[in-house]
């Protein structure tokens, strides 16, 4: 329970107070993209209150979009690297720092408005399917299981005897458990979490496809994959 509270606090505090210390956030300028996103949010009853663009291209060419907030105070953030054409020009005008640092190659990157909306359809799938809450519960259960496994094997005398110890020295116990038990535990849980993560991503893709963004999602994810490869 404590870990969930801490994670929820971090999820609330980080995007609102910490992230703006490292990147510049501006409201998404009025235009076709903003109208399309608001229409999408309304169609799935997503309680959207604010739309932001983060100027992240000065640190990375990777593109992303995410949402945060609780209850009826949801916000969506788009990386400036997602945008192209007129929408990117609007951001450049709003952000003097972006105008100074962005070169012609940066301006040429990005997606069409329909592709950006398709990406958000995918992200809304995570929200609609409760993936964030499910992942919080899984994290809690994983921590509980991990501590239980550690406590059991740390007190298991046969583990010490297998390595020639007839007592249970603290340093030896920590070394044996972390090196042999927890390392294996982490490998198993990493595989299981990867499987779970892939299922969540496929489910979000299917959600966006059912909203009618299948073809545009394919093209947008293809562009994201190409950018992330470099």
Image (cartoon, rainbow, N blue to C red):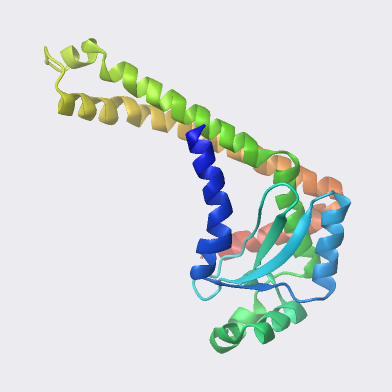
Q: Is residue 181 above or below residue 40?
A: above
Residue located at (79% from left, 49% from top): 208
> Percent position (x, y) of residue 19?
52, 64
Residue located at (18% from left, 16% from top): 160
Quarter of the image where one finds residue 16: bottom right
Query: Total label count?
Result: 0
Residue located at (33% from left, 16% from top): 152
Q: Nearer the viewer, residue 147 or 221?
A: 147
Quarter of the image where one finds residue 116: bottom right
Residue located at (53% from left, 71% from top): 23
> Percent position (x, y) of residue 112?
77, 70
Q: Is residue 33 left or right of residue 171?
A: right
Q: Is residue 6 left or right of residue 45?
A: left
Q: Is residue 111 above or below residue 195?
A: below
> Percent position (x, y) of residue 95?
62, 83
Residue 22 appearing in the image: no
> Percent position (x, y) of residue 146?
41, 27
Residue 207 appearing in the image: yes
Q: Is residue 78 left or right of residue 206?
A: left
Q: Nearer the viewer, residue 197 or 35?
A: 35
Q: Is residue 44 above or below residue 86?
A: above
Q: Is residue 159 left or right of residue 131?
A: left
Q: Outermost residue, bottom direction?
A: 100
């Amino acid at each position: 329970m404590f870990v969930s509270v801490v994670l929820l606090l971090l999820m609330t505090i980080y995007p609102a107070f910490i992230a703006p210390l490292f990147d510049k956030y501006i409201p998404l300028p009025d235009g076709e993209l903003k109208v399309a996103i608001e229409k999408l949010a309304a169609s799935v009853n997503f309680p959207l209150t604010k739309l932001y663009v983060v100027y992240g291209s000065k640190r990375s060419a990777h593109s992303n979009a995410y949402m945060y907030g609780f209850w009826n105070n949801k916000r969506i953030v788009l990386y400036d690297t997602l945008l192209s054409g007129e929408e990117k020009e609007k951001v450049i005008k709003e952000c003097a720092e972006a105008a100074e640092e962005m070169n012609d190659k940066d301006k040429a990157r990005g997606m069409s408005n329909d592709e950006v909306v398709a990406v958000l359809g995918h992200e809304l799938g995570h929200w609609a399917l409760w993936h964030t809450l499910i992942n919080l519960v899984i994290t809690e259960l994983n921590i509980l299981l991990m501590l239980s496994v550690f406590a059991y094997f740390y007190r298991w005398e046969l583990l010490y005897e297998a390595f020639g110890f007839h007592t249970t020295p603290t340093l030896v116990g920590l070394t044996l458990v972390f090196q042999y038990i927890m390392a294996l535990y982490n490998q198993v849980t990493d595989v299981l979490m990867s499987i779970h993560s892939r299922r969540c991503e496929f489910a979000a893709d299917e959600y966006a496809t059912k909203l009618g963004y299948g073809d545009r999602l394919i093209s947008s994810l293809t562009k994201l994959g190409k950018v992330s490869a470099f």
